[in-house]
Amino acid sequence: MSDEKIDFSLLDPNTDSDHFERIVAGIAAAARPELERRRLRSSVWWQMVQWRRPMLATAAVIILVSLTMTRIVGQPKRSLAQSDDIATALGVPTAVAGWLSSDTLPSPSQMLFQTEED
């Protein structure tokens, strides 16, 4: 290791200000296209353009789910005859099928005696 001081005067930009300004202008000119691109990307409209595909995909999924739920929920209730046909095919007693399709609950005695009769 040496005790001599290092001469940094060659790195001083103020020694040749014209040369320094030319270097700065060259760097700024070279960086201008990238800076312009970054400035445009940070705008709200550019962000909207970038998000258009994910937004459209999300909207399509929401529409499909909504239409499916509307069809499922919007269907009229099946009539008792249709419920009985399905219940018979599944082997469910007709009394139990009637309870399932109605809005009223049977009493415990009805449940006990009706299921024994079938």
Image (cartoon, rainbow, N blue to C red):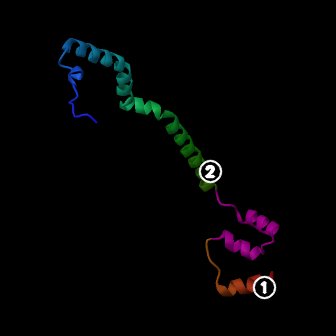
Left or right: 27 in relation to 52: left
Dot 2: element: helix
Q: Of 90 and 8, which appears nearest the observer?
A: 8
Horizontal side of residue 20 vs 88, given as left or right: left
Q: Give percent across and percent down for residue 24.
A: 27, 18
Q: Which residue is mark 2?
A: 71
Q: Residue furthest left?
A: 14
The residue at the point 41 percent across, 33 percent down is: 47
**Is residue 6 positioned above or below 72 on the image?**
above
The residue stretch that appears in magenta: 76-102
Where, quadrant-wise, is the C terminus in this rendering? Answer: bottom right
Q: Residue at x 66, y 86 (%)?
A: 108
> Is 49 situated left or right of 89 in this image?
left
Callout 1: SS:
helix
Q: Image check: 48 left or right of 5?
A: right
Q: Position of residue 54 (x, y in %)?
A: 51, 38
Q: Which residue is mark 1?
A: 116
Image quarter of residue 97: bottom right
Q: Amino acid at mark 1?
A: Glu
Q: What secondary structure prevails in the magenta region? A: helix
Quadrant for the N terminus in the image:
top left
For marks 2 and 1 on the same chain, the one whose residue lies earlier in the sequence:
2
Count of residue discs:
2
- Indicate the position of residue 98 as horizontal and vertical percent values: 71, 72
Q: Answer yes or no: do the residues labelled 2 and 1 have beta carbons within 8 Å?
A: no
118 magenta-colored: no
- At label 2, the amino acid type is Arg
Q: Which of the 4 quarters of the picture holds residue 35?
A: top left
